Image (cartoon, helix red, strand yellow):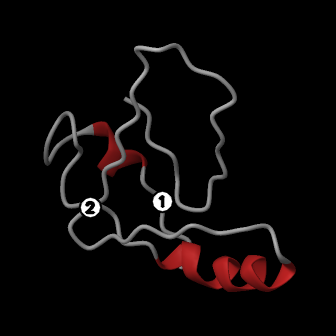
Amino acid sequence: MVVLPAGTGHQCLSTSKDFLVVGAYSATGTYDVCRASPEEYAREVKIVPKVVPPRRDPIYGKDGYLLKLWKRTA
């Protein structure tokens, strides 16, 4: 499993025929595709710090590492 912090850009450069990507979001989260325009960047700089931490670590539950590592900046 890989957890990408909010605002982290990513791109798939290559895959094999048996590669599968599954995206998951917390119950309070939303999917937001952003492009590299100056206007969108300015909007995202304000939005990203407000992302709410998940209630549980998706692998280890309520006492998992993700919740211990999550840092709020807003």
**Residue appearing at x 34%, y 64% in the figure:** 53
Q: Which is more toward the observer, 38 or 2? A: 38
Residue type highlighted by circle 1:
Lys
- Using the image as rendered, state which of residue 48 and residue 20 is in the foreground: 20
Residue in view at x 64 percent, y 69 percent = 34
- In the structure shown, which secondary structural element does the residue marked by tag 2 occupy? loop
How far apart are the alpha carbons under marks 2 and 1? Answer: 16 Å
Q: Is residue 6 above or below residue 57?
A: below
Relative vertical location of residue 42 with respect to residue 60 in this rendering, above or below: below
Local secondary structure at mark 1:
loop
Q: What residue is shown with label 2? A: 26
The image's mark for residue 33 is none
In the picture, the disc for residue 71 is 1
| Count of numbered tags | 2
Camera-side residue: 15 or 65?
A: 15
| Picture coordinates of residue 15, whole percent (x, y) | 57, 20
Q: Are marks 2 and 1 in contact (CB under 8 Å)?
A: no
Q: Is residue 44 above or below residue 67?
A: below
Quarter holding residue 42:
bottom right
Few, some or many residues within 10 Å of mark 1 (<14, 14–19, 20+): few
Pointer 2: residues within 10 angstroms few (<14), some, or many (20+)?
Answer: few
